[in-house]
Amino acid sequence: MVDYAEWLYDDVQKNRLVLETNDSQLARRNYLRSLSAFYDLILSNLRETTAKILADEFEISGMWKIHEIYPLLDEVARLSENGQLKLDVNKLPFLSLVAYTLKTYAKQVKFDKEVLSDHRWKAFCETVKIRHRITHPKYHSEIEITNDELKTIDDGWAWWNDILEQLREAHYKKMVGE
């Protein structure tokens, strides 16, 4: 089976190398697009992991709090007028979903720091706005990524890597300590 996370991570690294060796607007946009795809995939994996941890905890404690798992699901349930179960894509805003997933995961693995307190979280948020702008431009100038924006994108990427590494370490410590 293909490891899609590794594949997309390689895309990020290759696009960053292209950017460093031949800086252009195309290279900047490709770098940002590859980062966005990587973020989406890793968030999906983290949502699944977090939902499983919550389900395991709730099963052990005997107290189900489905509302905490619900936002982590890829699909949301609705009922038709005749009582048929229908599934729709979960369309929660990306940044809200990132924040909820990270906070929920951090709580479950006993991570003792605030996951969104780092100033680079704001850079990550700005990166998402930049990505949205270049994907849905209204004006020609909106497809360009400035030097300052490129630094913001890199700061957001550094935050992402750091917080995920810290959370992985906390999860490992929790598992070893149990």
Image (tube, rainbow, N blue to C red):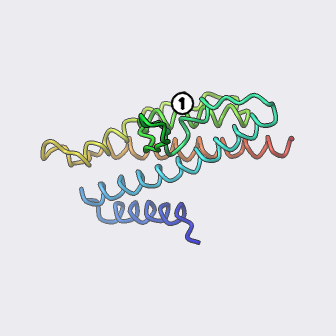
Instruction: Determine the residue located farthest toward the front in the rendered image.
Output: 82
Name the quadrant containing residue 142.
top left
Element type at mark 1: loop
Mark 1, residue position? 116
Does residue 21 appear to the left or right of 170 in the view shown?
A: left
Q: Is residue 45 visible?
A: yes
Question: Looking at the rendering, in which quadrant would you find the C terminus?
Answer: top right
Question: Looking at the rendering, in which quadrant would you find the N terminus?
Answer: bottom right
Does residue 171 appear to the left or right of 99 in the view shown?
A: right
Does residue 91 appear to the left or right of 169 in the view shown?
A: left
Instruction: Determine the residue located farthest toward the bottom in the rendered image.
Output: 1
At horizontal 28% and vertical 60% (from top left) the residue drawn is: 23
Residue 139 point in image, percent of width and height: 13, 43
Tell me the amino acid under the disc marked 1.
Leu
Residue 51 point in image, percent of width and height: 64, 41
Of the pair 25 and 47, the residue shown nearer to us: 47
Residue 163 point in image, percent of width and height: 59, 41
At horizontal 74% and vertical 34% (from top left) the residue drawn is: 58
Vertical side of 169 occupied by 21: above or below: below
Instruction: Determine the residue located farthest toward the right in the rendered image.
Output: 178
Report the label total: 1
Q: Is residue 123 visible?
A: no
Label 1 Cα crowd, 10 Å radius (few <14 / some 14-19 / many 20+):
some
At horizontal 56% and vertical 39% (from top left) the residue drawn is: 72
Of the pair 62 and 18, the residue shown nearer to us: 62
Residue 175 point in image, percent of width and height: 81, 45
At horizontal 70% and vertical 39% (from top left) the residue drawn is: 55
